[in-house]
Image (cartoon, grey):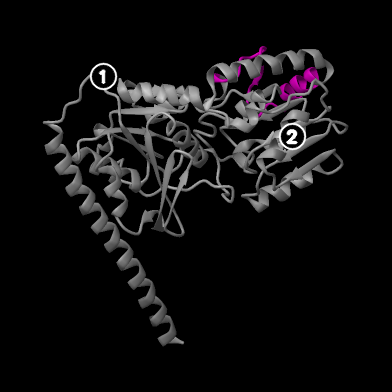
Amino acid sequence: MANSNYLEMFRTFIVEFFSHLRLLIRWNFILVLHRVAQILQQNRSHTSKYQPRKVVHISPKYFSEHSYIGGGERYPTTLAQTMAHYVETVLITFGETRNSCIQENLRVEVYRKIGTLPDSIFYLWELVNADVVHCHQYKTTLTNLTVLISAILGKRIFVTDHGGWANNFSEQLPIDKFVDRFLTVSDFSAKTLALTERTETIYGGVAQEFIDAQISVERQTKILFVGRLLPHKGIDYLIEAVDQETPLDIVGRIYDEIYFSHLKKLASNKRIRFITHATDNEIVSSYLSATVTILPSVYVDMNGMKHPAPELLGLVLLESMACGTPVICTNVGGMPEIVVDGVTGFVVPPNEKNVLKDRINYLINHPNIALNMGKEGRQKVLKEFTWDAVTQRCLSAYSG
């Protein structure tokens, strides 16, 4: 028994030793790159106006029809796909296997990764011929490394943060100094970065299938939630706010089994359906048939956990508006920036189920007002939140 305990202790020691060794090697490598980039930055200059010939987007995770991830991974893929119609564009991303493909005009290079890091640095060769390098997810070692190498190569560097986080060195080293501009998905996102002097908000866009949806004036009396089933989404108090006779569809994948069990208990004796697997077409149909879509995210969830940035933007709201369905959101994160209170929907305080209930019942009891709000929302999306509009704002920032 004693020998077994010593063996286990030795095994634990070895694992921790090599873990710390890898971290030390990684830190020293980043430190050297940072120093080289600092030296070379002194001679770096850009013309005031510049049209890029090649753009490389770097995203930590690959979004596909099989993905179980959210808007933070969909965003760079769709932006790159749209941008490829205007300028040569490459999307570099990471998955379980090495792969390469062409999606219309976009070349996609998928590199293998180990944990949160690429298993090789060969992806960096793609940066050599790039004019612009656009990194997605700021606080990751991948972005740290890419920014420093791009700075050494004299590239224009842009970063869009989507709220993700992994082990990184951005707190220890001023890596942000090498970024030309942070292109944020909302003004709220810019504030969370605390780098407002070098930020520009380009927002996010709506996929074409939502814009092309055939809108019907005949709606069911039904409330809709679309999103990940997590405590910071505030689904628990949405369920509490809905009357027993009002149908509510909750569409989203399960990420927390304990929370999901709690939601099912709250939903008992109410007309609530949980749809945990849905295609984009099925989600479009859900939007088209709903009275209103609700995104009730919170800063403090039912467990007392704090979430400083629960919604950087809220793409679900834009998708719903594109389908002509009004929305209700909480005054949280970047959501109030895209919802015009009383025009395209309502903005309510977080964690206030009685206020939320009042707004829900108002739209149910005033279908013509709900219909007009849906029309206003769709026009706002068509004017400001198509991916083409987002891409033009992005390209303008590159050349500014």
> Which label is found at residue 49?
1
**Tags 1 and 2 in contact by the CB under 8 Å rule?**
no
Query: Dividing the image into 4 quarters, which one contains the C terminus?
Result: top left
Judge from the rendering whether residue 317 lies leftward or rightward of residue 172; answer left or right.
Answer: right
Q: State the image coordinates of residue 305 (x, y, percent, origin top left).
A: 56, 40
- Are there few (<14), some (14-19), or many (20+) residues within 10 Å of tag 1? few
Assess whether residue 3 is covered by the magenta stretch.
no
Seen from the viewer's position, the closer of residues 6 and 119 is 119
* Residue 49 image offset from top left, x and y in percent: 26, 19
Q: At x 76% / y 37%, what residue is drawn? A: 249
Q: Is residue 83 above or below residue 168?
A: above
Q: What is the secondary structure assignment of the residue under circle 1?
A: loop
User: In the orientation shown, which residue stands out farthest toward the front?
Assistant: 104
Q: Which residues are magenta?
A: 337-363
Dot 2 falls on a residue whose secondary structure is: helix
Tell whether position 351 is magenta: yes
Nearer to me, 216 or 204: 216
Q: How many marks?
A: 2
Horizontal relation, residue 136 to residue 179: left or right: right
Q: x, y percentage for residue 113?
A: 40, 57
Mark 2 surroundings within 10 Å by alpha-carbon count, few (fewer than 14), some (14 through 19), many (20 or more) = some
Residue 238 visible somewhere in the drawing: no
Up-down: is 379 above or below 163? above
Instruction: Say which amino acid is labelled 2.
Output: Ser
Q: Residue at x 77, y 20 (%)?
A: 358
Whether residue 371 is visible, yes or no, is yes
Mark 1: amino acid: Lys
- Residue tagged 2: 285
Residue 234: percent from left, percent from top = 65, 35
Q: Earlier in the sequence, mark 1 or mark 2?
A: 1
Query: Alpha-carbon distance for marks 1 and 2?
Result: 44 Å
Which residue lies at the image location 63% right of the left edge and 50% below the top edge? 256
